[in-house]
Amino acid sequence: MREEIIVSGRNNPLIDPLLHVWHWEIPVYLFLGGLAAGLMFFAALYTIRNRENNYKVAVQIAPMFASIALILGLGALFLDLHHKLYFWRLYTTIRLASPMSWGAWILMIVTPISFIWSALHIKSIFPNWDWKFEVIEELLEFFTKYKKVLAWIMLISSAILGIYTGILLSAFNARPLWNTSIMGPLFLASGLSAGTAMVIWISKNHDERKRFAQLDLMIIGIELFLIIHMFMGFLASTQVQIDAANLFLGGEYTASFWIFVVILGMIVPAILEGLELKGYKIPIVIPAILVLFGSVMLRIIISYAGQASRWLY
Amino acid sequence: MAIDTKKCVGCSDCVVACQTENNVPIGYCRDWVVEVMDGTYPQLEIELRSERCNHCENSPCVRCCPTGASHYADGGIVLVTKNECIGCSACIASCPYDARYVHPDGYVDKCTFCLHRVKKGMQPACVAVCPTKCMYFGDLNDPRSDVSKILKKRKHKTLIPEAGTKPQLYFLI
Ligand code: SF4
Ligand code: SF4
């Protein structure tokens, strides 16, 4: 028998007995970042493919929600900081080895793009909108001329943002649950899925809804594949990663993960969307809200469970 | 630093000395003593280890810090610059040894190997106070330092080397 105890006593707040330095702020920040990435990705994609008129809501209106999500997300990140007065230090250096750092910088790029994009389309919601200043009108005209270029930049930067939300966690080798390269694609897929759900929710156009429901079905399929893949990887790995997987396979997070994330957040909405596509009448907000809920829960549960997973020594 | 697990008696003087020397806030500690008990009575084997930040050579805490607040000082000691730290806690999540904590003032804090004492030619507080003289501190690159000499003589180990951080705290076994 082996027993290991700290005899001098160690009860550092937030560290002992199990690490819990990150509460809801970081997962919410990651969710909002992922959602914004999803919304902006599809807006850019359909602009590049000249489908702007078919998918009006996705291209013109959804990115405004992305701007809001990004502001709220940055707010959540700020709330998480313990030494808030020094926030600006984030922007005095670029440290490529630190995901926190390049995440902060990618947000600095993505947020203004989302604002510009929203400004370009504000007249489609408020036809009488008046910018008051000549300069702004001129600036927007300039961006309208190069909209395709802007769309390409937005496409790439939003994909990076989406992957970043997962890499932030996967870069920590101290937490075996996070330390898998599946985290990047999984969080990107989850963000894209949240983006499609949002479009389905706010769009009134039948064709647009149908297209995004098809997209969402496909993305949910990819997510399920990635999740299975993640567990296969863990179970075939070292003891610490087997232990990490067991948090979800009988351990503390089993019920919450499988019920909230997989069943309610993926399988149920996929079935509902599938039925809707087949012609059954289903209030479309239900699957949309379930997908968004699943996407938040995925990040909350992974980030809490990750802090509970550790090396043995 | 090298620590002799055979000499340590688990008195926790090092913990108190550190708290006093470094004004560690009440309820926190930068070092701690672990007791590992193996076997069943009466065949018991005990290992006592005074642990702290390992001042890793490939430290994930320095790598993931977005501001450069966590850095290597001369000689490889890993330090946090208070007024560069934003308190994002990324370094805390990245340390496999849970050696860091958030100071009540907001910045992240941890063992400094008492660099302020070392600069004056003194030993770190924990080393100086240890009643069994079980700790050896010095420059690992200098073959004549106490720590290099003892590591040459004695069998030793580091904690979870498989985490890939190249820890620089050696336990004599
Ligand atoms: S023990 Fe932890 S805090 Fe210390 S250098 Fe290594 S990773 Fe960083
Ligand atoms: S909490 Fe401070 S020292 Fe740690 S990673 Fe963030 S900025 Fe760097």
Image (tube, rainbow, N blue to C red):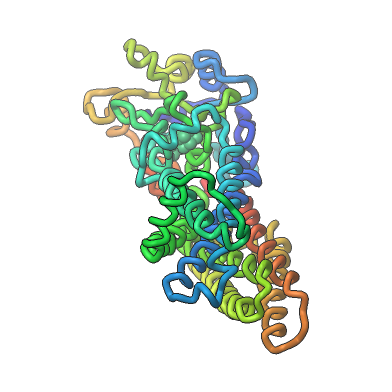
- Farthest top residue? B120
Query: Residue B143: x percent and y percent?
Result: 22, 28
Residue at the (50%, 41%) spot, across then down: B90
Which x, y percent locates residue B161?
Answer: 40, 46
Q: Is residue B69 above or below residue A221?
A: above
Q: Quadrant of residue B127?
A: top left
Residue A177 visible, this angle: no
Name which residue lies at 59% across and 39% down.
A80
Left-right relation of A157 to A118: left
- Location of residue A11 (image quadrant): top right
Residue A207 in view = yes
State the image coordinates of residue B65 (x, y, percent, origin top left).
43, 39
Q: What is the count of numbered marks?
A: 0
Q: Nearer the viewer, residue B108 or A90?
A: A90
- Looking at the picture, does residue A289 appear above or below residue B92? below
Name the outermost residue toward the left: B143
Depicted B1 relative to depicted A242: above or below = above
| The one of B145 and B113 positioned closer to us in this rendering | B113
Q: Residue at x 53, y 38 (%)?
A: B89
Query: Which image quadrant shows ligand 1?
Result: top left
Where residue B83 appears, x then y in whole percent?
A: 46, 24
Q: Residue at position x 42%, y 25% from top?
A: B81
